Amino acid sequence: MSRRNLATVIGAIAVVLLFYAANPWVSPPEGTITTIVNVGFWIAAIALAVVLFEDRKSADADVVEIEGPPVARFLFSNRQAGLFWLPIRVFVGFAWLEAGWHKFTDPGWTSGGAALRAYWERAAAIPDAPGKPPITYDWYRDFINVLLNGHHETWFAWVITLGELAIGIGLIFGILTGLAAFFGALMNMSFLLAGSGSSNPVMFTLAIGLILAWKVAGYYGVDRYLLPMLGTPWKPGAIGELRRSDPVPRAPTP
């Protein structure tokens, strides 16, 4: 069976399991069956990702079957579009920098993480009916409870604080803009899963745009020089080419 046929079969299994588990008109029985369905879905999803990743090596893997609109090609691939992304990048960057600096100067975050623990406790609380808990998904509440029970706020608060500062600096100066936007979106999603709205929906939406435009969003910044030097895993930059061109030392002849 070819990789693409295998991917189709695995994808169909994942869709059936997801339909059974997530369809609001179907009430799957609680207990072992639900656990098996959930575990089976994630196994199928991971297997599908692996098969699709391996299929990248096929001869026609880079063939574009449906052309995108010119405006999308311009915004996400043309370096002149960096002027469009520049104010968005700086706006999001300063928002993260301000949030990180606020936490950095707050003893509740840097002296034991008491502020973060209080936030987790509010998010994980389940109010009496008919009130709705801040967290919708039980698996995320379980994750927060694991952090609470292990008193991981002492180091996790520093991860969040320094992460927000790094994201802000990276976006403002255009340093690895795509990665900075990715981790910013990841933090926005984490806050949203915990029930925090605020500016997170807007920040997440803008971050997705910066991720898609990673090649050009930092062109008017450090990435203009950094990305050509570093290159990508599929196409090495100047540094990678320099390493390839280094002469291989030969063993001395007797």
Image (cartoon, grey):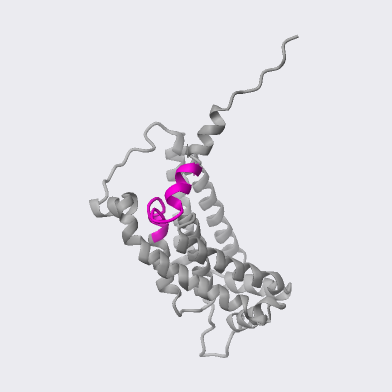
**In percent of the image, x 45 and y 43: which residue is there?**
228
Q: Could you tell whether 40 is left or right of 219 in the image? A: right
- Which residue is nearer to you in this view: 239 or 53? 239
Asked whether 119 falls inside the magenta stretch, the response is no
The residue under the point 72% across, 11% down is 253
**Do we see residue 12 in this rendering?**
no
Quadrant of the frame with the C terminus: top right
Q: Nearer the viewer, residue 34 or 86?
A: 86
Can residue 233 be spotted in the picture?
Answer: yes
Give x and y (percent) for residue 248. 62, 23
Numbered marks: total: 0
Left or right: residue 154 versus residue 180 is right
Q: Position of residue 169 (x, y in %)?
A: 51, 64
* 136 relative to 219, above or below: below
Residue 138, picture quadrant: bottom right
Residue 151: x, y in percent? 73, 74
Q: Nearer the viewer, residue 183 or 227?
A: 227
**216 inside magenta stretch:** yes
* Nearest to the observer: residue 202 or residue 42: 202
User: Compared with residue 130, is residue 165 higher up or lower down, i.e. above or below?
Assistant: above
Q: Which residues are magenta?
A: 210-232
